[in-house]
Every structure is written in structure tokens, then in C-alpha cells.
Image (spheres, grey):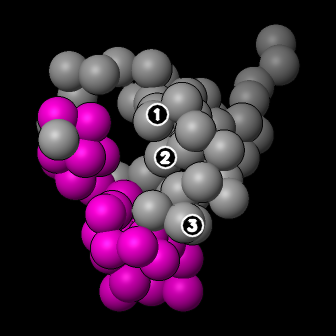
Amino acid sequence: MQTKSKRQQANDVEQNVATAPTQSVGALKLEPAARYLSLSKPSVYRLVARGLLRPNRATRHLLFSIVELDRFLQS
């Protein structure tokens, strides 16, 4: 019986969240957030630089809440 590594499990969770537009709780790192928005990573960086997308900078990584990503998609 093979088990998935923690990294594979985390990637599966991120991928499931990124493909579920009705999900309203949680946060995504840059790459899953870009997939959620159907954009490239450089495009997401440009949106942050222009102030159109607000990440949480509490950590070293850019984290985007699902609520913030949905707000951006609605506008």
C-alpha cells in the first residue's frame, strides 16, 4: 500500500481549493492563486503592484485569501 507524501497531499488540497469557486474559506500561495484566477504568476505580481489584488503579507510568502480572489473576480 503506497501512501502520499505530505507535499503531495498539500498539493492535492491546493488543487482542490483552486478548482472550487464556491469555496470561501482559506488562502492560497501565488501559484495556486494564479491558477484560481486563470492568470500567469507575472500577471498576479502586476495586479499586486498596481494595488488591484491585496495579498496577506504576514509571512514571507504572498498569501491570497479566497475571499480576496473572489472579490477581484467580481470587480
Query: Mark 3 or mark 1: which is in front?
Result: 3
Residue at the (33%, 62%) spot, across then down: 53
43 left or right, relative to 7:
left
- Across and down, in percent, residue 15 comes to 55, 29
- Across and down, in percent, residue 63 comes to 42, 66
Q: Is residue 70 visible?
A: no
- Mark 2 near mark 1, Cβ–Cβ under 8 Å? yes
56 left or right, relative to 43:
left
Residue 73 on the magenta span: yes
Q: How far apart are marks 2 and 3 (CA)?
A: 11 Å
- Across and down, in percent, residue 68 comes to 22, 53
- Across and down, in percent, residue 8 comes to 72, 36
**In this picture, is 1 found above or below 42?**
above
**In this picture, is 52 found above or below 9?**
below
Taking depth in this image into account, of 3 and 50 the one nearest to the observer is 50
Checking the image for residue 45, the label placed there is 3
Q: Quadrant of residue 32?
A: top right
Taking depth in this image into account, of 20 and 3 the one nearest to the observer is 20
Residue named by callout 2: 33
Q: How crowded is mark 1: few (under 14 residues within 10 Å), some or many (20 or more)?
A: many
- Considering the numbered disc 1 on the image, is that residue within a helix, a strand or a loop? helix
Checking the image for residue 36, the label placed there is 1
Taking depth in this image into account, of 72 and 67 the one nearest to the observer is 72
First to last magenta residue range: 48-74
Which amino acid type is marked by label 3? Tyr
- Considering the numbered disc 2 on the image, is that residue within a helix, a strand or a loop? helix
